[in-house]
Amino acid sequence: MKSEHKNAIVADKIATVILYCIAGFFLLLLAGFTAYIIVKGIMAYQPGIFSFERTGIGVELFNTVYLVLISLIISVPIGVGAGIYMAEYAKAGKVTNYLRICIETLSSLPSIVIGLFGYLVFIYMTGSKYNLFAGALAVSILSLPLLTTVTEDAIRAVPSIYKEGSLAVGATHWQTIVQICLPVATPRIITGVILAAGRGFGEAAALLYTAGMSSNVNLNIWNPFDPMSLLCPFRPGDTLALHIWALKTESMTPNADQIANFSAAVLLVLIFAFSLGSRLLGARLDRKMSGK
Amino acid sequence: MDKIKFDTKSLDLFYGDFQALKSINIKICENEVTAFIGPSGCGKSTFLRCLNRMNDLIDSVKMKGEIIFDDKDINGDIDVINLRTRVGMVFQKPNPFPMSIYENIAYGPKCQGLKDKTQLDTLVKESLTKAALWEEVKDRLNKSALGLSGGQQQRLCIARTIAMNPEVILMDEPTSALDPIATAKIEDLMSSLKKDYTIIIVTHSMQQAGRISDKTAFFLMGEIVEFDETPKIFTNPNDKRTEDYITGRFG
């Protein structure tokens, strides 16, 4: 009896140590990677690297943010809507099971497949050139399953006493969803949006044949309907991730490596800033609701 | 003869294959407090939730029989939203919405389309006053309701229900999560509310049923064993099973 108790305590200690080791290992790995990329990036810094000319990465940086924004504008309403449907309206049965399999399959499709699908549908079938909007659509397809699943889980996690309370004062199902469930679920949905945006920031394969690998803009044109304008979403545009890949594989520029290194660091900072911003927003909403 | 608010006729309720309510017949009178007592799982909460169609949320529920509320069977072709504004509900666990105290009260009326700020202000004040909460919260109406104590939260939920100006208030063990002082406040509140509302309360506490109710129904295994004036049930029940439960021989 006594020794069994002792064994349990020892096992508990060992498990704690092992778990801390695993966590520490990953933390080190992450810190190592980040430091490597940031340091190499800073070392590669040269004046004018942010310029919008050929030697700079200004256009790529803009393209990245622009493409992610467009893709979020497309995918968030659809993904959240689908998540609400799955959580609140879908009745258990064959159709729902089939839908669920579809969502799971879609989420595990390799992004190059989605890229080629995007090329076929958004470029070839519409007869257009590579463009940012098509890229945003492809990224939206990638992030839709994620947004749907996260929203469904978030809505399901809303305590049922809130829902019952709302229905009991005569609110409709829809009023309950919009005014009670969605606000409560928002912090978790924001996590999903961060992950979705992360995919957009880092995506390369899905954009190869949709958004294209080059940008050709005339900075003197500000009419967003002119295909040479920076603001036009219907022009070819390479994002940072793709730019890095292109620089590392086929660029003729003499300092391609340095630009690629710096781009990687910028991309990392961009993603970090976006996650931090969204999390702060989520935390603020959470605080506001819990009344602290 | 008192006016009858709910007239239930041979109501059966099934969760899938399990029959949770068996041939329930009960007439509930206006402006009285009716208590449902009985051991856990006897169907008293299930029956309470029939009265504002809260069981609609559960897919597997099937019902037979009638519940007549104002000449209409509420399981028939009626407006459920309208029913729920007329038959309010207070839950076991206080469930204020994660918004301000003011917004909690204004939520129901707003859902019904009331927009006028002055009217809403008056309604919020009246409801909180009736629920004996106004004095405690009048300076913090815009603070989150989740910062209130459990007892205050439950009175807020009662105020939220009152704001809809219902005819009936259903209470599902409203004090089981509260301390004795908060419980006493809610019980006081119930006796003052009964002149304006019909109150139906499910309770696990027989003392509570004895203190606050005019009539008591004893539920057992999905049936109503006995339904009568509260003093009669507690002092001189007709059925042996009621007596056994009251005297604590089981339950």
Image (tube, rainbow, N blue to C red):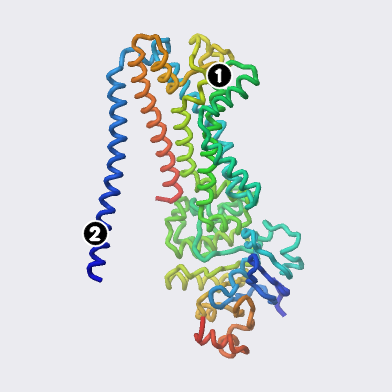
Q: Which mark is residue B74?
A: none
On screen, A77 above or below A227? below
Q: Position of residue A12 (x, y in %)?
A: 27, 58
Q: Give the left or right position of residue B148, taking residue B18 as reference.
A: left
Give the alpha-carbon distance from disc 1 to disc 2, as whole Å: 61 Å
Query: Which quarter of the picture shows residue A278?
Result: top left
Foreground pick, A36 / B79: A36
Q: Which residue is mark 1?
A: A131
Q: Position of residue A108 (x, y in %)?
A: 51, 37
Residue B216 in view of the camera: no
Foreground pick, A165 / A255: A255
State which chain disc 1 sits on.
A
Q: Circle 2 — which element?
A: helix
Q: Position of residue B99 (x, y in %)?
A: 49, 51
Q: Give the left or right position of residue A148, taking residue B167 as reference.
A: left
Q: Position of residue A184 (x, y in %)?
A: 50, 48
Q: Which residue is mark 2?
A: A10
